[in-house]
Every structure is written in structure tokens, then in C-alpha cells.
Image (tube, helix red, strand yellow):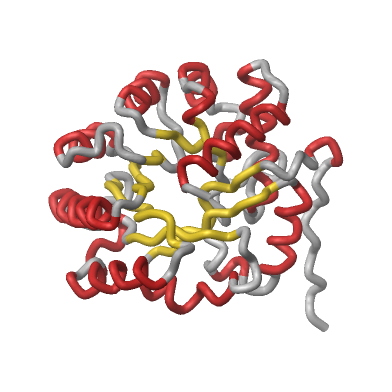
Amino acid sequence: MGKKKSKPAPLPQSLALPYTGVESHAHLDLPPFSSDIEEVLKRAKESGVRYICNVFLGHEAWKNNRHLFEQHDEVFFILGTHPSHVDQCTDAELNAMRAAFAEDSRLRGIGEIGLDYYWDHFPRENQKDIFIKQLHLAKELNTRVIIHSRDAAEDTIDVLEAEGFVDYPVLWHCFGGDAELAERIIKNGWYLSIPGTVTYPKNEEAREALKVIPLDRMLIETDCPYLTPVPYRGKRNEPAYTVFTAECVAKELGIDTEELWTTCGNNAIRFFGL
């Protein structure tokens, strides 16, 4: 007899927020969601998530999995080569990405792209080369850029500045840096997306950084299935849990949770052109 599948814990009623939120970074096409994607999308809507940005890690992922969202107009897409997979970003891949944008109006940006010095799977110069090629593609397509930067903030900013992306629509995904880094990002005219890690008790630096981020530059994300916020840390993350991040951020800033939720949602709608 198979083990009974456990149900996700229900959202506290106090965190069923208005239908104005946007989940700005999810990976719902990955295997952890293969058995219950419809339920996940239903819970997101019930929690107040109006739109979800699904990030496809490469052209094949987009081609093979976009059908999952055919009946869900609330889901839009981002497509790009992650810095941990730069060996896959050939000229053929870039051409395939270019063709995808011509075909699919739900594609709203290139990402997540950038530099990852934490895992360092590939030489840093190789990472920079692929990062720059994708930045050029974003400009060619006149579309947005979603940044992945881990232990590589200085080089990431240097590349963006050198390639002419100051005051370009750039979103710094999964921001967890300090106030100084936040100020540099804001100064360049970019946006920041706050993940569930801001709820972790020891992450005081990230919570302090919130105080220097203008509310009109802030978005909320899960990066699901990863980085689950308190109170479900350690379990699979999902878009509905953006409400917990919003509650934490609002409390830290001393503002109403619904106000923060709606403001960040409107920022995402403006950034992604929804």
C-alpha cells in the first residue's frame, strides 16, 4: 500500500490577501510540481496572486513545458540560460530563443542570466561571455533583463554598466544583499525582487536592506520550489507562499501588509508590461 500523500498546510486566513499580488519568479515546470500543478495554481489564486512569472531555464524547457500553462492566462514567461548552464548557450540556442520571442507573446524578458561564483561550475570569463551575449539579445528584442547574481555582485554590476544597461528595465532576482548593494542597484535605475529568505531569523542584513529600497522598485518572489519562507521553511515552496514574504517585509517597514502586497504587485505589472 503506497504512502498517503500529505496535503500542503492551509494558508492562515489572515494571509489570504487581495487579488492584486504578483509572483515575480517561479519554476513551476520543474519536477517537484509535476503531480499537482493545477492545485498549486489554484492555491496561488486563493492567496491573492493575480499573475505568476514562470522562468524557463533554456529554450528546450520552454518548448517542452509551456503547454502546462495553456489554460492559465495569469502565467507569463521568462526565458534564458542560467550561469550554471552556460555550456548550453550556443549560437543555435540564442537563435532558438530569438525565434521563441517572435512566436510567444507571453515571453516578457531574458532571464535568469548573470554570474554565479558560489557554484562556479564554469570559468568566470565564460560566464561573463554568455551573460553579455544574452544582454545583447535582450537589447535586440527590446525586452527586460532578469538577473541571477550569487557571490558576484561587483562583476555583475560592472558588466551591466559596461554594456549600457543603466536605466534599462533590469530586475535583480532573489535579492539578499546588504543596504549598500541595494543602493547601488537602485542608483542604476533597476528593480529588486525579495525572496522568502528575508523571513529567516538570522537574515538580519537582508531585512535592514529593505529600508533603503523605494517601495516603487520592490517586487516579491518565491523562486519556488526553492527558498521556502517561514513558517514552511524546509518544505517545497510555491507561489501562494509569497504572502508570508509580503507580511515579513511589511512588518519590517512598518506598513500595512495589503498596501505592500498591492504596491509590489503594481510594480511587477509595470515592470513586465502586463
Above or below: residue 168 compared with residue 177: below
**Residue 4 picture location, percent across and down:** 82, 72
Above or below: residue 260 compared with residue 102: above
> In front here: 233 or 224?
224
**Residue 232 picture location, percent across and down:** 70, 45
> In front here: 223 or 138?
138
**Residue 72 picture location, percent across and down:** 64, 66
- Answer with left or right where residue 214 lies relative to residue 41: left
Above or below: residue 222 compared with residue 106: above
Above or below: residue 110 compared with residue 20: below
- Answer with left or right where residue 96 lies relative to residue 245: left
**Residue 18 picture location, percent across and down:** 76, 40
Q: Identify the image quadrant of residue 97.
A: bottom left
Work out which quarter of the rendered image holds the N terminus and state it. Answer: bottom right
- Answer with left or right where residue 231 lies relative to residue 51: right
Q: How many marks?
A: 0
> In front here: 230 or 144?
144
Looking at the image, which residue sits at the far bottom? 1
Q: Residue at x 33, y 57 (%)?
A: 82
- Answer with left or right where residue 69 lies relative to residue 82: right
Q: Residue at x 82, y 50 (%)?
A: 10
Q: Residue at x 53, y 36 (%)?
A: 267
